[in-house]
Image (cartoon, coloured by chain):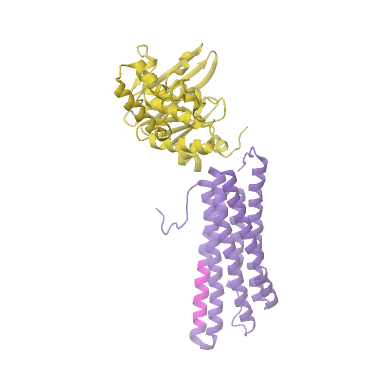
Chain colours: A yellow, B purple
Amino acid sequence: METYDFDTNIVIARSVNFFYGSFRALTDINVGFERNKVTALIGPSGCGKSTLLRLLNRMNDLIDGARVEGEILFEGKDIYAPNVDPVDIRRKIGMVFQKPNPFPKSIFSNITYGPKLSGNCSNLELDALVEQSLKAAALWDEVKDILGKSAMTLSGGQQQRLCIARALAMKPDVLLMDEPTSALDPISTAKIEELIDELKRTYTIIIVTHNMQQAARVSDYTGFFYLGKLIEFNRTEKIFTNPDVRQTEDYITGRFG
Amino acid sequence: MTERRHTSSHYEKELQEIKDGLIYLGALTEQAIEKAIRSLLERDSDLAKKVIESDCVIDNKDIELEDRCIRLLALRQPAARDLRFITTSIKIVGHLERIGDMAVNIAEKAIILNELPQLKPYIDLPRMAELTRAMIHESLDALIKGDIALAEEVRKKEETVDYLNDQIFRELLTFMLEDTRTIHRAVIIMQISKNLERIADHAKGVADMVIYMVTGKSVRHMPECGA
């Protein structure tokens, strides 16, 4: 079994099993997510990739009958240890969902909502944070003059970048993305992909995608999941040119199902 | 090696068409070599002319197959083994087309030699021709079966062809040293031999690509420049 060290890997899953009631959704997952890299999780529907992603910031806590075994270590500490506050974890490990889900508030408030809740920032600081976050999400130029307008007036692609800006405003270390472009048109998708490439300088990104070309385009590492198991984890280039495992090869070449 | 079928049967069919096309193109080049050498052995210049004329069939097939490959790259975004198969096919098509051109060169030389008294009985040339023809056949067989061992055998045969080429050169040298009137014919025979030797290089190129396709590892320029 491969061992992952904390110097290069910001998040490490060790012997993780996950159950929804009696259904075992993940079996013995061992994987490390390298700092400032993009890791893509691919696999057919129901393979466990989104389940793993949601485990990484304790989103599955909310599901009745869900049970985790093993360890998920963030900066060397188990995020499922009894004394850990899940809210604290979600601040450091942000998430962007499949469908853009801005709050029905102004663009400005969407960014400041989280930081306001979690601490006292001055108005000046909030202004700076909004600009900073929107710039980091490559949305600033498009919305700088309409910050007071409702976020719901933005296009789908803009809304998704707003959600990324909202996640960045919490100054996370890791950004989880669950099919972030599946509801977007190709141009908005290209902008998000471009953004991912920019963001990895500052953040570690883990992305679940059904679009294999997207995984190939944006990620440094790719993990292929099937029936709750991590079948192969490797450099993306390797996975898409010459994978080690036959099942991976069958999946990425379209010989599945 | 058994391979699972694609979920898309249309894609599966398109890949199969490229395979079939390579086999067909390979068969055309084999025929071209065989006929070009026969036109020399049997002093049949009409046959040599047919080889020259039918090269455009090979050329057209070359373009058609390359088009098919490029279309699949654009439309199917192939990955892994499929990607290696398609890129490999593009290179193999190039090798086969060049082999066709060399068969034409041989046919052209045969026409010249057929007008002149025969310098010597041709013994090694047909052996070389048969070896190179077999190399093409086996390398494409290896491609279809994904058979690395067979591809390796093809690569070894290239050495034998090189050896025969050297041997023909030495033999012709003795003719030329003894009688300068043989120089014209000897040089033409050498050119034929050289063309066969180049054909063997291209057939080895095909075998190299088969190994790459199956393993993902490049063996080209090895051992000369190999790490």
Q: Residue at x 66, y 53 (%)?
A: B20
**Residue B61, x across and y down, in percent:** 64, 60
> In this image, B185 relative to A54: left or right?
right
* Quadrant that contains the N terminus of chain A: top left
Residue B11 picture quarter:
top right
**Residue A226, x across and y down, in percent:** 54, 28
Residue B223 picture quarter:
bottom left
**Residue B118, x across and y down, in percent:** 62, 82
**Residue B109, x across and y down, in percent:** 60, 77
Front-lying residue, A91 or A163: A163
> In this image, A147 relative to B191: left or right?
left
User: Magenta residues?
Assistant: B162-174
Front-lying residue, B108 or B201: B108
Q: Is residue A88 above or below residue A221?
A: above
Could one spot residue A236 in this view of the protein?
yes
Residue A174 painted magenta: no
* Quadrant that contains the C terminus of chain A: top right
Q: Main secondary structure of the magenta part?
A: helix
Count the numbered circles shown: 0
Residue A75 picture quarter:
top left
Q: Residue at x 42, y 31 (%)?
A: A143
Could one spot residue B127 in this view of the protein?
no
Q: Is residue B150 above or below residue A230?
A: below
